[in-house]
């Protein structure tokens, strides 16, 4: 063992010799370091036994940045401290990456060709979106049975809401059934067969199963699989060939699993099968399980593993990340949730009973001493969303000049709030970085490209021509487009272009004259020159519109972008659109414009660009803007947690509201929860036990539990300073104001008592 100083609890973990071991690790306990150290120890053991030619330590984690972090850490430990070759004797994979490795070894076992393709989120979400749009057009009236007609003037207004909101709703229901089916190894035709035999009416299940079947046909049409299919196929391959499974068990004698609280049932089953229920180390924090709403993750699997009789438990309760006041606040949130009589019994089980312990004297990572806690809740004061942002930014403006060597983050519950924070920081000239679904530069680049694509898709529409002029060309061509005179002239030309009955009069003037002349003799010559340049550019793009979409995108980008970052963005967007076009040969410019709109309006993450390959490192003196989900695994000296109200962080109280409950759906039903229960009971042969509304009520509590854990994650990102704020929500002027979250009210009272004592 090396000379690095380990805590006693860490030494217990790295002294592991075999069998099943559970490591419940609190935030900041050094679990990544400890697991890397254990991996290096096991690699050293394999080397000493001359087994590196045939065996590897398998490390499985949750994200690609985590994979890269583990590889780097283990490489340093085995090379610098043990003198072994780097990257030999261990394999680090995400769970889906591991499944991919297994399927690629023997694709024939599951009926796949050697060259099978994996579709990423962009393509799969497009398939589901298209299906949802078709379903609304053909069968959408079925959803009207779930509408609350007291909220509508007449059936026509309800139908308009169905057309406007229904696609998103159907899309969410399709995702729910697809994930549930795949995690339980059920094919859609199997589900349909069981449904057709039952005497009970399960309309949401029928809709979801039909969409699941259509989705699978879409994958089959492309000769491809999605990421969830990889785990299914890996399990099928392992179970169909015992000799193949035996070889892999020999190849990977030790399996170390990181972030085990985020595993799904199927992923859990795959690792148990690979380990032979033997040498399997599971590391995670049930209190940081914050993905259950979005995935099939189930932290109860880790909790049950911890309780298994043959599992050795070696928790990591000591954390050197945060100052004692921050630890005290996080621990109180856990204690209050478990003991509060205000909360339903089910919600009181949201947290695993494990306290964060501060470090002992002489610890290699002592807790910070300096700390500041401010909980911005006053029962006499209401805070609008705008004033909350202003309060936080004024605080940053006062604080930053004296703390240039500190890191700081503003963490929000969802991306939309983060975008507003980023805009406000930009307006006040405060340096910041984004860890949101897509960065502002990505959104801006995609938006400009989208405007050009919209025009090329229908060049006869004067409104699109006018928008192209005002929102793209004018902003590029005029030195100061925000000047009052520039705005006046730009709007004048925009309105004139909008009124064009035939855009050819401007784009391709004939013998009868040039449309520009119709703007009047007093038209400034510089404006005339810009209009002529704009016309030439529009003609050039129209001539280029027959090019393959990736080449067209690059051609447009050459005119739109000059900075290196934007040029790089243009190239990456070209690659993305090219891939989408290949996978969807029926797509034309309107479809591709919609893809760009999805990026520019933050409906979808721009994969492959905003994901940090090596993980994110906060910069001193620069404000990080991130969601609390994206902040998991990171830390800052000072943290602002915003929008901690009873909408973003409900606690199953009578006045709370829930994001999954749509205002137009009757009886406060959560249709995602309802379709989940219908399908789950169907698979279990208990369709007759379905009771409408029960799943929605339980989903409220499960969601509240996850949001309390998300708040815990946010609190434990802070090393020294923590500021928590709230707002009334954007509908407060309409009489639908939110209150501060019950957890924030409790923490405020607790902290005031702490200060007094």
Image (cartoon, grey):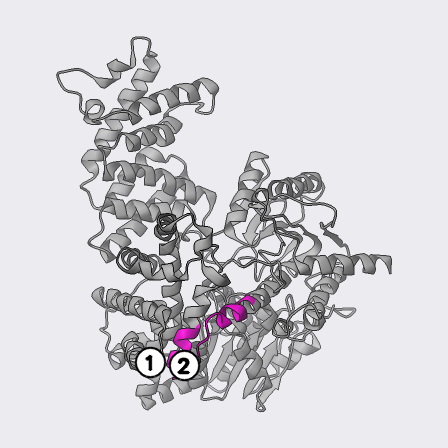
Residue 750 occupies which quadrant of the picture?
A: bottom right
> Element type at marker 2?
helix
Residue holding disc 2 = 688
| Left or right of 19 on screen, residue 55 | left
Residue 479 occupies which quadrant of the picture?
A: top left
Looking at the rendering, the stretch of residues picked out in magenta corresponds to 677-700
The residue lying toward the viewer, choosing from 254 and 378, is 378
| Quarter of the figure that contains the C terminus | bottom right
The residue lying toward the viewer, choosing from 273 and 527, is 527
Question: Residue 705 lies in magenta, yes or no?
Answer: no
- Tally of marks: 2
| Left or right of 513 on screen, residue 433 | right
Query: Does residue 37 appear in this view?
Result: yes
> Element type at marker 1?
loop
Q: Main secondary structure of the magenta part?
A: helix
| Quarter of the figure that contains the N terminus | bottom right
Give coordinates of residue 652: x percent, y percent: 61, 65
Give coordinates of residue 229: x percent, y percent: 33, 72
| Left or right of 23 on screen, residue 462 | left
The residue lying toward the viewer, choosing from 654 and 573, is 654
Give coordinates of residue 560: x percent, y percent: 34, 34
Instruction: Point out which mark residue 419 bears.
Output: none
Instruction: Point out which mark residue 199 bears.
Output: 1
Question: Which mark is first along the chain, 2 or 1?
Answer: 1
Name the residue furthest right.
757
The residue lying toward the viewer, choosing from 136 and 621, is 136
Disc 1 to disc 2: CB gap under 8 Å: yes
Q: Mark 1 Cα within 10 Å, few/some/many (few <14, many 20+)?
A: few
Query: Does residue 364 appear in this view?
Result: no
Give coordinates of residue 44: x percent, y percent: 53, 80
Q: Mark 2 Cα within 10 Å, few/some/many (few <14, many 20+)?
A: some
Spatial separation of the CA atoms under disc 1 and disc 2: 8 Å
């Amino acid at each position: 063992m090396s000379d690095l100083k380990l805590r006693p609890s860490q030494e217990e973990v790295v002294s592991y010799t075999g069998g099943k071991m559970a490591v419940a690790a609190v935030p900041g306990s050094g679990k990544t370091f400890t697991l890397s150290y254990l991996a290096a120890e096991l690699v050293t053991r394999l080397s000493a036994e001359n087994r590196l030619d045939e065996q590897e330590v398998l490390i499985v984690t949750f994200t690609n940045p985590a994979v890269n972090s583990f590889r780097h850490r283990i490489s340093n430990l085995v090379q610098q401290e043990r003198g072994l070759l780097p990257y030999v004797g261990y394999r680090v994979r995400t769970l889906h990456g591991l499944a991919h490795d297994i399927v690629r070894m023997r694709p024939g076992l599951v009926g796949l060709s050697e060259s099978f393709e994996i579709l990423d989120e962009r393509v799969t979400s497009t398939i589901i979106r298209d299906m949802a749009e078709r379903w609304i057009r053909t069968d959408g009236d079925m959803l009207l049975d779930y509408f609350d007609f007291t909220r509508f003037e007449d059936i026509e207004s309800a139908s308009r809401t169905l057309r406007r909101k229904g696609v998103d709703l159907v899309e969410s229901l399709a995702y729910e059934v697809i994930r549930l089916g795949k995690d339980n190894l059920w094919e859609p035709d199997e589900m349909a067969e069981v449904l057709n035999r039952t005497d009970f009416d399960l309309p949401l299940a029928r809709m979801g199963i039909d969409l699941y079947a259509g989705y699978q046909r879409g994958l089959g049409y492309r000769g491809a699989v999605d990421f969830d299919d990889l785990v299914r196929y890996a399990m099928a391959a392992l179970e169909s060939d015992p000799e193949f499974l035996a070889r892999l068990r020999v190849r990977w004698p030790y399996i170390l699993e990181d972030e085990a609280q985020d595993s799904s049932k199927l992923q859990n089953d795959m690792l148990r099968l690979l380990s032979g229920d033997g040498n399997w180390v599971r590391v995670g924090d049930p209190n940081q399980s914050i993905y259950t709403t979005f995935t099939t993750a189930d932290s109860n699997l880790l909790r049950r593993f911890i309780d298994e009789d043959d599992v050795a438990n070696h928790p990591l309760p000591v954390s050197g990340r945060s100052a004692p006041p921050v630890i005290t606040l996080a621990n109180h949130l856990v204690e209050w949730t478990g003991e509060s009589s205000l909360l339903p019994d089910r919600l009181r089980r949201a947290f695993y009973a494990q306290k964060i312990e501060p470090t002992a004297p002489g610890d290699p990572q002592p807790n910070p001493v300096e700390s500041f806690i401010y909980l911005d809740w006053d029962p006499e004061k209401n805070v609008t969303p705008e004033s909350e942002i202003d309060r936080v930014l004024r605080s940053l403006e006062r604080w930053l000049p004296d703390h240039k060597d500190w890191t700081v983050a503003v963490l929000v519950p969802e991306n939309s709030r983060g975008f507003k924070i980023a805009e406000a920081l930009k307006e006040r000239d405060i340096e910041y970085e984004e860890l949101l679904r897509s960065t502002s530069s990505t959104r801006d680049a995609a938006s400009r490209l989208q405007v050009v694509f919209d025009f090329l898709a229908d060049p006869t529409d004067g409104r699109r021509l006018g928008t192209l002029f005002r929102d793209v060309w004018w902003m590029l061509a005029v030195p100061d487009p925000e000047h009052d005179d520039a705005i006046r002239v730009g709007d004048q030309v925009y309105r004139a272009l909008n009124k064009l009955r035939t855009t050819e009069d401007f784009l391709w003037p004939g013998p009868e004259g040039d449309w520009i002349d119709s703007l009047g003799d007093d038209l400034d010559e510089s404006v005339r020159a810009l209009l002529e340049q704009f016309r030439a550019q529009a003609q050039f793009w129209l001539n280029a519109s027959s090019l393959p979409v990736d080449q067209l995108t690059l051609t447009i980008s050459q005119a739109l972008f000059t900075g290196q970052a934007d040029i790089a963005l243009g190239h990456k967007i070209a690659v993305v659109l090219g891939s989408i076009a290949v996978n969807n040969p029926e797509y034309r410019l309107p479809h591709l414009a919609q893809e760009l709109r999805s990026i520019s309006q933050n409906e979808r993450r721009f994969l492959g660009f905003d994901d940090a390959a090596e993980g994110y490192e906060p910069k001193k003196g620069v404000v990080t803007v991130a969601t609390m989900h994206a902040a998991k695994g990171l830390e800052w000296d000072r943290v602002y947690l915003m929008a901690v109200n009873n909408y973003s962080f409900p606690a199953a109280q009578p006045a709370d509201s829930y994001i999954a409950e749509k205002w137009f759906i009757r009886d406060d039903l959560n249709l995602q929860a309802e379709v989940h229960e219908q399908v789950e009971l169907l698979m279990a042969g208990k369709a007759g036990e379905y009771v409408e509304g029960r799943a929605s009520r339980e989903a409220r509590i499960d969601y509240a539990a996850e949001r309390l854990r998300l708040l815990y994650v946010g609190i434990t990102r802070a090393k020294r300073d923590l500021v928590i704020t709230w707002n009334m929500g954007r509908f407060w002027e309409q009489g639908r104001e939110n209150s501060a979250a019950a957890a924030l009210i409790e923490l405020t009272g607790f902290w005031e008592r702490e200060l007094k004592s």
